[in-house]
Image (cartoon, grey):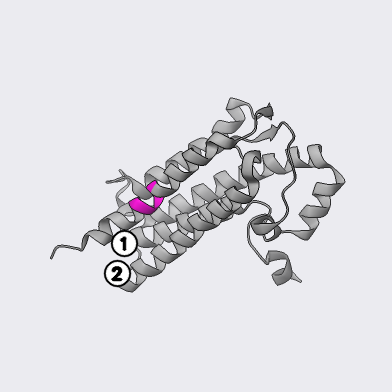
């Protein structure tokens, strides 16, 4: 039985639309004052690239990673699509709030501003939060063990990048950023309130 085209093209369409927007929005970024070294950057770019390959590559050479976690069902696909779309939209919202302060590389921009409203009032790194949600949704849609590994690798890559950014933002904004860190969780909204 032939699957409807939506099942084959919805996720690639969402991710491709996101990439096109991301590239278009990058034109407005401020010039950099300080930029992460290439070696440091590779420590999160390589695991993230492997996560993308695991999620979307065909025929991962480790057979058990291609095994299904659960039987495929249309309702699961649509829940996964909703989670992915929500995650990608959250990143776009964060990108709009960040404006010209954004960079794909850990940087300090000329005239860098500390943004702490909009999605940045919920989490300090909403772009990574949204991307993790989108990875999770996409992994559920794939429904194979490689998706689990992809999410874990993406999470590790983002966590490493968060640590570098946190150090740089603390150096730049000092007590103001430390107060923001105490007030707002890094990646998971409401995390601090769930712990208390």
Find the residue positioned furthest to the left. 1
Q: Is residue 15 magenta?
A: yes
Residue 109 at least partly seen: yes
| CA separation in Å, label 2 and label 1 | 7 Å
32 vs 80: above or below: above
Magenta residue span: 12-16
Question: What is the x, y in percent for residue 190?
Answer: 68, 67
Residue ID for mark 2: 71
Drawn side of residue 40 relative to residue 132, left or right: right
Drawn side of residue 71 relative to residue 23, left or right: left
Classify mark 1: residues with Cα within 10 Å, few (<14), some (14-19) or many (20+). some
82 vs 113: above or below: below
Q: At x 68% / y 43%, what residue is drawn?
A: 163
The quarter of the rendered structure image containing the N terminus is bottom left
Classify mark 2: residues with Cα within 10 Å, few (<14), some (14-19) or many (20+). few
Question: What is the x, y in percent for residue 179?
Answer: 83, 53
Residue ID for mark 1: 68
Judged from the image, the secondary structure of the residue bearing numbered disc 2 is loop
Q: At x 80% / y 37%, what residue is drawn?
A: 171
Residue 143 at least partly seen: no
The quarter of the rendered structure image containing the C terminus is bottom right
Dots 2 and 1: beta carbons under 8 Å? yes
Q: Nearer the viewer, residue 173 or 137?
A: 173
**Residue 195 occupies which quadrant of the picture?**
bottom right
């Amino acid at each position: 039985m032939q699957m409807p085209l939506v099942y084959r093209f919805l996720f690639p369409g969402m991710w491709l639309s996101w990439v096109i927007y991301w590239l278009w929005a990058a034109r407005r970024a401020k010039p950099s004052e300080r930029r992460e070294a290439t070696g440091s950057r590779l420590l999160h770019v390589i695991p993230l690239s492997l996560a993308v390959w695991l999620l979307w590559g065909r025929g991962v050479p480790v057979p058990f990673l291609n095994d299904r976690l659960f039987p495929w069902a249309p309702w699961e696909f649509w829940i996964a699509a909703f989670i992915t779309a929500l995650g990608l939209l959250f990143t776009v919202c964060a990108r709009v709030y960040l404006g010209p302060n954004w960079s794909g590389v850990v940087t300090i921009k000329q005239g860098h501003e500390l943004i702490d409203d909009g999605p940045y009032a919920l989490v300090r790194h909403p772009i990574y939060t949204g991307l993790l949600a989108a990875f999770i949704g996409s992994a559920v849609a794939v429904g194979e063990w490689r998706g689990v590994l992809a999410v874990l690798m993406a999470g590790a890559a983002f966590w490493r990048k968060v640590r570098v950014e946190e150090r740089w933002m603390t150096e730049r904004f000092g007590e103001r950023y430390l107060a923001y860190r105490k007030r707002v969780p890094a990646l998971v909204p409401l995390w601090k309130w769930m712990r208390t």
